[in-house]
Image: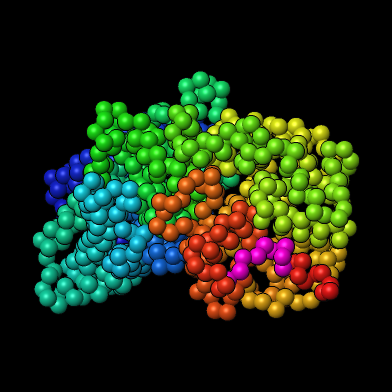
Amino acid sequence: MQITREIFRNFPAWMEVSFYIVAFSAIFIFLYGFYRRYKKYKKGRPSGRFNRLGERFANASKKMATNATIFKRDPVAGWGHLLIFWGFVVLFIGTTIIAIDHDFLDMLFGVSILHGTFYKIFSLFMDVFGVLFIIGLVIMMFRRSKHLPQLDYARPDLKEGEYDRKGYKVDDKIFLWVLLLIALSGFMIEGLRIAVDHPPFEVWSPVGWQLGNFFRSIGFTGDSAFFVTYWFHAIIVMIFIALIPFSKSMHMIIDFLNLMFSDEMSARRLPGVSEEKMKESMGYTKLEDFTWSELMDFDACTKCGRCHVACPANAAGTALSPRDVILDLRTYADSKMGISEFFKQSLNIGNGTKEPALAGGVISDDRLWSCTTCMACVETCPVGIDHLNTIVNLRRALVDEGQMEDMLQDTLQNLGDYGNSFGKSDRMRARWTKGLDFKIKDARKEEVEYLWFVGDYASFDARGQEISRKVANILHDAGVDFGILYESEKNSGNDVRRVGEEGLYEMLAEENIETLNDARFKVIFTTDPHSLNTIRNEYPDFGGEYKILHYTELLLQLIKEGKLNVNQKIEKRVTYHDPCYLGRYNGETENPRNIISSLGATLVEMPRNRSNSFCCGAGGGRIWMDDSHMTERPSENRIKEALTLEGVDVFVVSCPKDYAMFTDAVKTSGNEGKIEVMDIIDLVEEAVMVPA
């Protein structure tokens, strides 16, 4: 007996022809659906993502192969998806090999590869990965049965009845159940085929062999059951293929492309506005303003809800959900292009207006202004969606129209007039230095090794000023050669840009760069992670390339070199809060921890730490806006998290804005006396200063 199998076993000619008609019809619908989406992407502006294609392809392939982005903080989803992914890939490759063998090699050249030893190994692989595929589907079904908050499609901005997302739930169920039916019916076909002839070599198909034995035991040894099951399987497969561009299934293709064409500097470096675009609006006002990669972002969303539960604005009870912003823009873009998702949300975009504005209409202004630009949504997204860039570009349109809170508008006015958010004279920027018993060098007039870019809160806020004086004293005692820019320093513009005031940001950046270029220094350091981010990642686009450190890196360097002697150990149990712009934006999480460890303190981690840190709520200009409407401020949420740690009574920060937000949060949450907020320099000072 030849070790192989007949593809269309005992099929009459009409049945074979019917199969190919159904198959090509499904493929045509599939191609048509993706052609419509391709036309939508063509409508977008150029994105400049076709550089380093080989490297991009390799990186995306690695992420897909390992499912690394899905495992992150959700191992159950990671394992389930990994089994589904590799099961699907192997079964797809196997089906492709069968098609090539039967429809090309055998039909055109009379040769076949599916026989002998290769066929046995092929059969074993198909059965093993088919079982793994089913296990993965069952895991994901079980996970969905747990009613996880990230899988709840309730919207924070609308009341029940103002929208309908039943289509999303149906889509989720269809996706999993159709795949399960395809896998199970595939094994049924194999078992019924083996049951008829029972060839001994089919023992290499372990699942099919056992099913074949079962069917033989109950008398299913004829072709009728095989034909019925075969056609059930074939029709389900073809329906699945045809549905891919119109359902959740499209993420299987779009997500790989989205990962491949994602920007590795996403959120850290926001794009500027071209002179041509400035003539119309600084922000996005129509569908054509989006780049093709941003339009692809909308289709890539799998509705997994990770960004939804990670968002501090959503946790604070505001109208914002990053997931819903992306899904609403997908619905809007598809409606504009006449593209239909079969299982979509029912949504009255723009409250019935004929042509709603993108910013303030499709996406309401209260949702856009709620964003803290903490980057949690971007960091946690498993498919590389850049929510933040989209939100900022829509904010730019609101700024153009003057649609913002009075408090924010006043702050932007201050920044334009005085170069700082406090509306103080630039001559007052260095007033905090008057409490020192030494003169800090003026880096504009004399050369220094380190230039300290102080920042607004460290210069003008009373609490920040005290911290700045401690930093200055510690560095002076350690013999560090440093200076500041005095009244020539302006706000770095990081949060100004993320508010959406691009013109003001560029003015501030250019003025700072001009000042920095005239100063004489080797390295910049700053106590402000917000300034660190924009000077490091965005100033180079304006000709300002500098080496810049966060002060925790400099402090740790001084401790390692013995220039800061730890005279007494810190006998405290502390927890540390990772600032968004230091940890998540710039990946610097270990320097502060190493400092705390070197001082002898016991560090107890909060559940959300490092890249998963929870935002204080100050970023993206939120510190300049009213937060009285929030059910719980993000800073209060974070303090509550710290209070769950046993024996911890010190909350350590390394950002002036964090210090301001969390000292306020301790008071407003009624936790004074339970936990103390300290800057990391407070611990250093306590450890290195000899007691009186």
- The answer to whether residue 141 is left or right of residue 488 is left
- The answer to whether residue 174 is left or right of residue 314 is left
Residue at position x 40%, y 39% in the image: 365
Is any atom of residue 583 visible in this view?
no
Q: Which colour scheme appears in the figure?
A: rainbow
Residue at position x 36%, y 59% in the image: 150
The percent position of residue 559, horizontal first and vertical second, equals 80, 66
Indicate the quadrant containing the C terminus: top left, top right, bottom left or bottom right: bottom right
Residue nearest the observer in this picture, 159 or 168: 159
- Let me know if residue 170 is in the magenta part: no
Residue nearest the observer in this picture, 571 or 414: 414
Q: How many marks?
A: 0
Residue 415 higher or lower than 132, as above or below: above
Residue nearest the observer in this picture, 612 or 603: 603
Residue 596, picture quadrant? bottom right
Is any atom of residue 142 visible in this view?
yes
The percent position of residue 77, horizontal first and vertical second, equals 40, 64
- Let me know if residue 677 is in the magenta part: yes
Residue at position x 72%, y 68% in the image: 683
The percent position of residue 21, horizontal first and vertical second, equals 19, 41
The percent position of residue 3, horizontal first and vertical second, equals 32, 64
Indicate the quadrant containing the N terminus: top left, top right, bottom left or bottom right: bottom left
Residue at position x 56%, y 56% in the image: 661
- The residues colored magenta run 675-683
Residue 332 higher or lower than 16, as above or below: above
Residue 27 higher or lower than 176, as above or below: above
